Image (cartoon, rainbow, N blue to C red):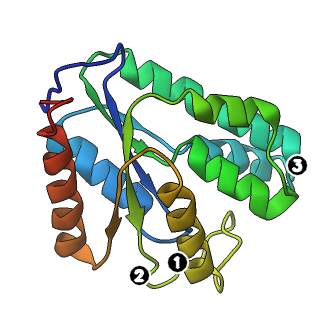
Amino acid sequence: MARVAQTSETGLVVCVTGPESTGKTTLAEELAEALDVPLVGEYARHYLEARLTQGLEDYGEDDLLHIAKGQLAAEQQALAQGTGLVISDTDLQVVQIWWQERFGSSHPWLLDALAQRTPRRYLVMAPDLPWQADPLRESPDDRQRLFDCYLEVLRASPHPFAEVFGSGRARFERAMACVQDWLVEPQFA
């Protein structure tokens, strides 16, 4: 198991992020398994799939706020396991970008929660994989613009990030190398 000396109460979150259909879930699962650490799943997928089974295809700001709170609670639960490292398939940053794209300015609760995030690093998935259709995906022709948006937001944040390109094993190896580099940083070694 990958253990990190905890310099905060919670440890380090490595968030796999980026536009739709870029292999985030696959990579997050592979990293969590390879490192034998908790995986925080994408709360939005479970929430929106449940709504679809009820015939509710649209969503609003209240739904996004619920998703943000559910994602944060899942992350906090994983961090409470005390492994020092957690892999997250998306996080509140994704919800903020999603909110801005869909509704404009973000909710005050979300902005406050973003300001209080635990230490984290981001793996930003490039849109260089073929689009995979999915009833929950909305932006098949806008992935490059959204990728650029993620980069812009992360460049303005205090959280280090790395871009992940390529496919298959090369994509995984690039991401794993980034995580291993982050784990030897003085504040986490």
State whether residue 110 is above or below residue 170.
Answer: above
User: Dot 1 lies on which element?
Assistant: loop
Q: Quadrant of the N terminus?
A: top left
Look at mark 1 in the image and give the residue it sits on: 132
Residue 155 location (% of width, % of height):
48, 59
Residue drawn at (62%, 70%) of the image: 134
Residue 19 location (% of width, % of height):
55, 68
Look at mark 3 in the image and give the residue it sits on: 60
User: Dot 2 lies on which element?
Assistant: loop
State whether residue 93 is above or below residue 167.
Answer: above
Determine which of the numbered discs, if any, sits on residue 112 in the image: none
Are dots 2 and 1 in contact, CB under 8 Å?
Answer: yes
92 vs 160, nearest the viewer: 160
Q: Is residue 130 left or right of residue 5?
A: right
Determine which of the numbered discs, if any, sits on residue 129 in the image: 2
Residue 74 location (% of width, % of height):
52, 28
Q: Is residue 65 left or right of residue 112?
A: right
Residue drawn at (67%, 56%) of the image: 97
Q: Is residue 173 visible?
A: yes
Q: Is residue 57 visible?
A: no
Crowdedness near tag 1: few (<14), some (14–19) or many (≥20) residues, C-alpha within 10 Å: few
Instruction: Indicate the quadrant where residue 109 lies.
Output: top right
Q: Residue flagged by tag 1: what amino acid is it?
A: Gln
